[in-house]
Image: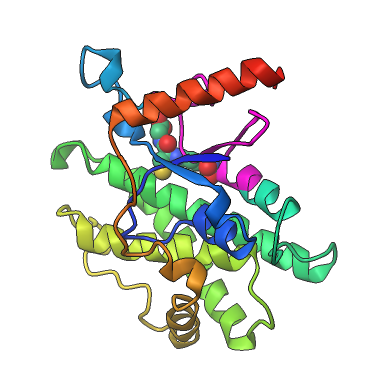
Amino acid sequence: MKLFYSPFHTFVHKVLVTAHECGHWDHMERIATFPFKNNQGEDCGDSYDISQLNPLDKVPTLVTDDGQSVFGSQAICEYLDSTARTGKIYPEPGPKRWDALCRLSLCDSIFESTVQMVMEQWKPRDQWNMGLFEWLWPKFTAGLDSLERDAKRGWDSFDVGHAAMLHAISYLGFRAEFYEAKDPIHPNFNWRDGRPALSAWYDEALQRPSVQRHYNQPFEGDDSAAACQAAVRACLDLRATNGA
Ligand SMILES: N[C@@H](CCC(=O)N[C@@H](CS)C(=O)NCC(=O)O)C(=O)O
């Protein structure tokens, strides 16, 4: 199978953690895809366009060994879990599963909202929509506080909600460190402040082999647009052969 994703290993990727936990790591080709670099050159060969695999032209997008596209990180994680070669990270139906799915949903929302804020700050300072920040911040703080209460109670296993927590929380740190533009409401925000249980859980979870395998590690492979387009063509050929 092939995974098209943005190889910024400066934060934890939920789909990579899931792939590793479920025993797919060595059976998954990782294709560097930078969706925001699309359409910047006149030559289509310079593009990371994957719209023939995913109409939204978004990462992550997975193409199975049968040539079927599975897109949206939630769909990908579920696919990886249901075809797991080793461990599974979706609990059986019941309270533990609903808890994991709620944390997945909460953290995906925090992650996507953080991306929205980052993109807002690509604009000149006087054009930032302050309403966006005012709307999102109470959700972030309430969400993180809820995770702190959960972490105080603790968990007895690692699930997909934890993979999403690592993804969202590490991205909050990445945003604060990597981007020059400071948040207009909380310029010195540190998610750890007042959240000792979540902080301790996070530091321990970061040590998992599924995280260490990619987090802060260089991308292994060719990250050029040409390599991405070659992989897209291979997927389309496979799809045509299999009628997927
Ligand atoms: N709900 C999707 C969100 C994916 C997403 O927003 N991906 C962004 C990068 S973080 C993207 O590819 N954006 C390109 C675009 O919007 O054109 C998921 O969880 O997979």
What percent of the width, then of the height, locates residue 55? 53, 22
- In the rendered image, the quadrant that contains the C terminus is top right
What percent of the width, then of the height, locates residue 43? 24, 13
Our reading of the magenta stretch's main secondary structure is loop
Picture quadrant of ligand 1: top left
- 124 or 212: which is nearer to us? 212
- 135 or 59: which is nearer to us? 59
Image check: 156 left or right of 129? right
Residue plotted at (64% across, 86% down): 153
Residue plotted at (32% across, 52% down): 219
- Residue 154 vs 182, above or below: the answer is below
- In the rendered image, the quadrant that contains the N terminus is top right
54 within the magenta span? yes
Rendering colour mode? rainbow
Image check: 73 left or right of 215? right
Quarter location, residue 12: bottom left
- 52 or 110: which is nearer to us? 52
What percent of the width, then of the height, locates residue 42? 21, 12
75 within the magenta span? yes
Residue plotted at (63% across, 51% down): 77
Residue plotted at (31% across, 23% down): 47
| Start-end of magenta stretch | 49-76
What percent of the width, then of the height, locates residue 80? 66, 51
- Residue 35 vs 176, above or below: the answer is above
